[in-house]
Image (cartoon, grey):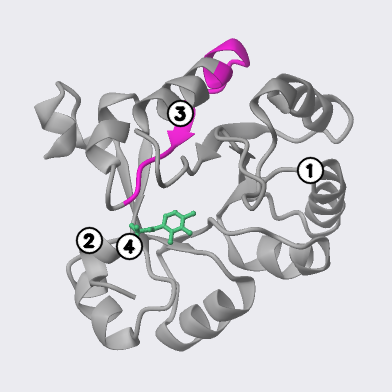
Amino acid sequence: MAAKSVGREAGDVTLVAVSKQQPDARILPILAAGQGVFGENRVQEAMERWGRLGRDGLELRLIGPLQTNKAEEAVALFDVIETLDRERLAEALAKVMQKTGRTPRLYVQVNTGEEEQKAGVAPREADGFIATVRDRYGLTIEGLMCIPPADEPPAAHFALLGDIAARNGIARLSMGMSADFETAVRCGATSVRVGSALFGDR
Ligand SMILES: *Cc1c(COP(=O)(O)O)cnc(C)c1O
């Protein structure tokens, strides 16, 4: 609906259902309704949940910070890793991907608000970082991801992410959560990550 209202087709925007910290009882009906893409922010929690519920035919996305010592488990479980944000992680992922032949799609996380407590590369370092992971580690970057500061209007952050993507030849933008997904879709999101609006408060 958000897509239609801004002149985009619903199929242009992927709904990533953020299942982190939700009980199975809330996830099962959404699975039964045919939702096929889920977002998780912790490797361990995701392994437990989707080992239990079964993940055949589903697309699982990691949307939380990834430690290099979890790279192997993350590559084994996730179809998309949205939080590539430092060279050591690029190196670790490239190594595991080469070794296992599994190639999850990768997004670079950009800390558009340059917040101390948030992961992601600073906007002014994004071009250099993207070039490095492409050239030095041979990784393909499918998209960019951001989480705007909670206390600022998000549109400027979404626009900034779009600018960085455009000048780096990147077509996909993961942006927008429960509180701001409509704005994100208006700003060109190709996927939105919605948790509480779908499942209820955590
Ligand atoms: C938890 C989380 C979401 C979903 O947040 P809601 O406000 O519940 O929609 C989206 N993106 C990331 C990175 C998250 O950690």
Question: Where does the image place residue 48, in percent across and percent down from the top left?
Answer: 54, 85
Residues in magenta?
164-177
- Of pointers 1 and 3, the one earlier in the residue sequence: 1
In the picture, residue 107 is in which quadrant?
top right
Asked if disc 4 is less than 8 Å from ligand 1, the answer is yes
Residue 157: give its label.
3
Q: Is residue 172 magenta?
A: yes
- Rendered residue at 60%/38% (across/down): 111
- Looking at numbered disc 1 in the image, what kind of residue is underneath it? Arg
- From the image, tell me which residue sits under label 2: 197
Q: Which SS class for mark 2?
A: helix
Distance from Cα at disc 3 to Cα at disc 4: 20 Å
The answer for how far apart the CA atoms under marks 2 and 1 are is 31 Å
Q: Taking 172 as reference, is 89 above or below it?
A: below
* Residue type highlighted by circle 2: Ala
The residue that disc 4 covers is 195
Distance between the Cα atoms at labels 4 and 1?
Answer: 26 Å
